[in-house]
Image (cartoon, rainbow, N blue to C red):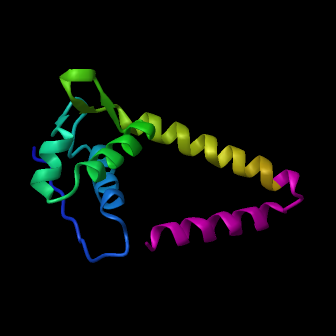
Amino acid sequence: MTLKIALDLDAATAPYEQLRTQISEQARSGALPVGYRLPTVRGFAEELGLAANTVAKAYRALEADGVIETRGRNGTFIAAAGDAADRKAAAAAQEYAEQARRLGLSRAEALSLAEDAVRAAYVR
């Protein structure tokens, strides 16, 4: 297995976000298995032609999402991301549903707004 990243530096999406998205998708699909060791921030930045801060920002976001874990000097590894991502998404959905109900929205209105938000997020 190989970490395959294709960045479009002319795209509207920031390079760190492209990197975060691709690693996350590869981890969730199993292309990068749990325990796979990621390159160092500096090494990966050099390989991709990015600033080290850009890669570090992507790694921080992935760690906050539970996709990767840093083990000090031992390196950065793919974590059991599916469960963590599912839990976070379910918690966010639950919070949204409760807020929509408190605001007096009907079930149909809440679903419509959620679908619009998801559609907008995935066209980027």
Q: How many marks?
A: 0
Q: Where, quadrant-wise, is the N terminus in this rendering?
A: top left
Residue 37: image quadrant is: top left
Residue 15: image quadrant is: bottom left
Farthest residue to the right: give it.
104
Residue 83: image quadrant is: top left
Provide the major secondary structure of the magenta segment.
helix
Q: Position of residue 97 (x, y in %)?
A: 74, 51
Task: Determine whether 70 is above or below 64 in the image.
Answer: above
Residue 102 on the magenta span = yes
Residue at 79% of width from left, 60% of height from top? 107
Residue at 71% of width from left, 45% of height from top? 95
Q: Position of residue 117 (x, y in %)?
A: 60, 67
Q: Position of residue 87 (x, y in %)?
A: 53, 37
Q: What span is colored magenta in the figure?
A: 101-124
Q: Where, quadrant-wise, is the C terminus in this rendering?
A: bottom left
Q: Position of residue 44 (x, y in %)?
A: 15, 47
Residue at 20% of width from left, 28% of height from top? 75
Task: Determine whether 32 is above or below 74 in the image.
Answer: below
Q: Is residue 99 left or right of residue 38?
A: right
Q: Is residue 9 left or right of residue 85?
A: left
Along the viewing direction, whichever of 51 and 24 lies nearer the viewer: 51
Along the viewing direction, whichever of 85 and 46 lies nearer the viewer: 46
Task: Determine whether 52 is above or below 123 in the image.
Answer: above
Residue 119 on the magenta span = yes
